Image (cartoon, rainbow, N blue to C red):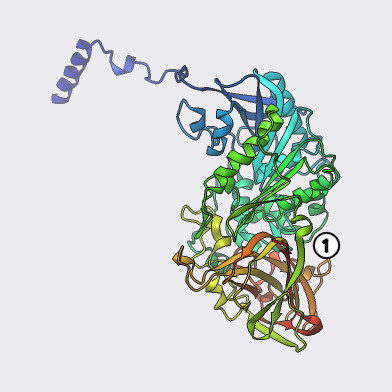
């Protein structure tokens, strides 16, 4: 009775205020509502652009209302979602809505466009990871070259106020897409800036390095290959991924724990463990070598790129051979991790560069490059053929080509008995060996544990290449060779190559070589760098590919063979008082899957009983002296 009276009272009160009973009311969210945009300094358009096969690609266009007209277009094609970079904030200001690297572009009046590639996020069609160009392994009539062409065709015809000139750019996968776009460019495409591109996934980029499988890319593969909008992440159940991968066994066994072994993307990577047609047909450096150079290109490369350390310099070298006047192909090598030129760049980990190198690059190099080729404005200074940051001197340097023109000479860092490192010296007359036991049950971690997953909110994956290497130098399965303190600067500019003459008691082995700058015991300006061991360059190679990356062969136990370990390019001055160190080891876990050290058909599918400890011996001195070859700048 009381409840009925209260209900009646409430209805009477509502009626007194002119409100209808709830049953008669409409919902409070209007069917059509648009935010007030009169104060916005830009127009945001969302369109579905048709491709030649009828598939429509989701595209977001941001057009500044102010600024000169007609204006150029800068396009980025991405598998990571076009809505994300165009919805960075709720603001009437385009500079706030777009990524920070776009701020100078939008203020200069550029029309900024982001597009979902086919099969991803809002776009139609089927997704294939790094879809190969039309040919033996892509029987479709379309690829990313045609999609780029069709997109530019639509943009110049349908976006009001454009000047008919388009630039193409992107970081990482979008950097690879940028390279795809210049293979057969639309006439309106006038300049391209591929940044940190994946060029060869087997030689030295995302998936393999010199034949060793980067199994921790499983996390990325799982997200990209399981849902078109990357809605799923693997439920690891571990904080320390070192433990997770070790407990699982092989890379494929690890993937099977989460159902990832059934993903098509994973299968084609693990099943193609040799450098076969699958990889050779997609080798972008070879595609570029066959392509006519029709537009200026600025390649951006990070000297501490933790994901694609091969791609940038390989793309530059393939294109540079076609640049007859040395004025169309440019290379910028910065002190950056993967994509860092687009963000803050005054430091990386404990290493400080004395200035925001990324901001300087975007303002003084990148924007003038776009302005020159898309607006037709002469730059204050011509874009140099090569701009490279010296990570030991904290200075930008310009070169006519890369490596540094004729100013580079090859010198040897010779591994000597007693853990000594000879600089430019002839191999010692006496011979010797250095040995260690490599046990797959206790692999060398690539960084101090716990090793977090790449996308863990606490992860510092993006700076692991500058981690202090002292914790690993103390392990018995890591050999160290150290020079005397330098008395004068020594600058290394270019590709580093390890030459190991080695034997093993097993039938397979991996070899890791690291070139390290050892700081003095005390550093007044930055005390945490006292004795710091900074890895300037380092990489791994799988011993079974010592003769031919397409034809793996077992290693003869006890027989000395030469292993050539290709390391990433460096641009670094070892300062007086510093020492040079080389570390040699046989695992880098869990970044790379463990070599069982018994020859099996596919290491990614190795069984528990295949993993066995082995003794590795490095030859020192004599005709089989092991050494690291470095390109040293002379005349400075």
The quarter in which the N terminus is drawn is top left
* Depth order, front residue of 349/171: 349
Q: Which residue is under mark 1? A: 550
Please, which residue is most extreme toward the front here? 635
* Depth order, front residue of 517/446: 517
Which residue occupies 59% across, 52% down?
336
Q: Position of residue 491 (x, y in %)?
A: 67, 63
Q: Label 1 neighbourhood size at 10 Å, few (<14), some (14-19), many (20+)?
A: some
Which residue occupies 51% across, 28% down?
94
Q: Position of residue 19 (x, y in %)?
A: 26, 13
Residue 84 shown left or right of residue 300 in the figure: left
Q: Position of residue 450 (x, y in %)?
A: 49, 65
Which of the 4 image quarters holds residue 618? bottom right
Which residue occupies 77% across, 72% down?
563
Would you say residue 550 is visible in this rendering?
yes
626 w.r.t. 493: above or below: below
């Amino acid at each position: 009775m009381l409840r009925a009276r209260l209900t009646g009272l409430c209805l009477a009160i509502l009626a007194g205020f002119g409100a209808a009973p709830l049953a008669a009311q409409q919902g409070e969210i209007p069917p059509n509502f648009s935010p007030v945009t009169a104060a916005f300094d830009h127009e945001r358009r969302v369109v579905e652009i048709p491709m030649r096969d009828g598939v429509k690609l989701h595209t977001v266009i941001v057009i500044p209302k102010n600024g000169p007209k007609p204006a150029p277009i800068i396009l980025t094609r991405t598998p990571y979602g076009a809505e994300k970079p165009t919805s960075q904030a709720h603001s009437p200001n385009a500079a706030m809505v777009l990524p920070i690297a776009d701020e100078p572009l939008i203020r200069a009046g550029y029309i900024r466009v982001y597009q979902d590639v086919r099969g991803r996020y809002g776009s139609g069609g089927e997704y294939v990871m790094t879809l190969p160009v039309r040919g033996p392994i892509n029987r479709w009539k379309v690829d990313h070259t045609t999609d780029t062409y069709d997109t530019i065709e639509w943009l110049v015809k349908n976006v009001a106020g454009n000047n008919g000139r388009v630039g193409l750019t992107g970081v990482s996968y979008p950097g690879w897409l940028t390279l795809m776009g210049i293979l057969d460019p639309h006439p309106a495409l006038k300049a391209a800036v591929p940044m940190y591109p994946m060029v060869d996934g087997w030689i030295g980029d995302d998936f393999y390095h010199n034949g060793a499988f980067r199994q921790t890319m499983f996390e990325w593969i799982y997200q990209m290959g399981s849902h078109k909008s990357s809605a799923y992440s693997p439920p690891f159940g571990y904080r320390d991924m070192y433990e997770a991968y070790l407990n699982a066994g092989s890379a494929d066994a690890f993937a099977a724990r989460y159902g990832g072994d059934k993903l098509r993307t994973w299968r084609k990577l693990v099943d193609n463990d040799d450098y076969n047609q699958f990889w050779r047909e997609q080798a972008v450096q070879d595609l570029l070598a066959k392509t006519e150079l029709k537009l200026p290109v600025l390649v951006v490369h990070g000297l501490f790129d933790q994901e694609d350390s091969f791609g940038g310099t390989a793309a530059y070298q393939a294109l540079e051979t076609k640049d007859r006047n040395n004025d169309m192909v440019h290379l910028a090598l910065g002190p950056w991790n993967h994509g860092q030129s687009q963000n803050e760049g005054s430091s990386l980990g404990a290493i400080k560069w004395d200035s925001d190198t990324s901001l300087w690059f975007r303002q003084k190099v990148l924007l003038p490059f776009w302005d020159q080729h898309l607006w037709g404005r002469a730059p204050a200074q011509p874009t140099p053929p090569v701009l490279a940051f010296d990570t030991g001197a904290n200075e930008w340097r310009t070169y006519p080509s890369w490596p540094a023109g004729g100013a580079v000479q090859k010198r040897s860092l010779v591994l000597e008995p007693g853990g000594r490192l000879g600089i430019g010296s002839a191999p010692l007359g006496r011979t010797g060996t250095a040995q260690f036991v490599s046990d797959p049950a206790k692999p060398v971690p690539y960084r101090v544990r716990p090793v977090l997953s790449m996308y863990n909110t606490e992860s510092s994956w993006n700076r692991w290449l500058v981690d202090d290497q002292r914790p690993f130098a103390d392990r018995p399965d890591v050999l160290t060779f150290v020079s005397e303190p330098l008395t004068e600067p020594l600058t290394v500019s270019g590709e580093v190559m390890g030459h190991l003459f080695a034997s093993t008691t097993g039938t397979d082995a991996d070899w890791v070589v690291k070139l390290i700058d050892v700081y003095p015991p005390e550093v007044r300006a930055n005390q945490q760098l006292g004795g710091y061991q900074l890895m300037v360059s380092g990489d791994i190679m799988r011993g079974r590919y010592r003769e031919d990356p397409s034809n793996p062969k077992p290693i003869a136990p006890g027989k000395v063979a030469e292993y050539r370990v290709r390391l990433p390019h460096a641009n670094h001055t070892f300062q007086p008082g510093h020492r040079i160190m080389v570390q040699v080891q046989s695992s880098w876990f869990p970044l790379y899957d463990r070599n069982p050290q018994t020859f099996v058909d596919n290491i990614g599918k190795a069984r528990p009983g295949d993993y066995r400890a082995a003794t590795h011996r490095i030859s020192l001195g004599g005709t089989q002296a092991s050494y690291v070859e470095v390109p040293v700048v002379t005349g400075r």
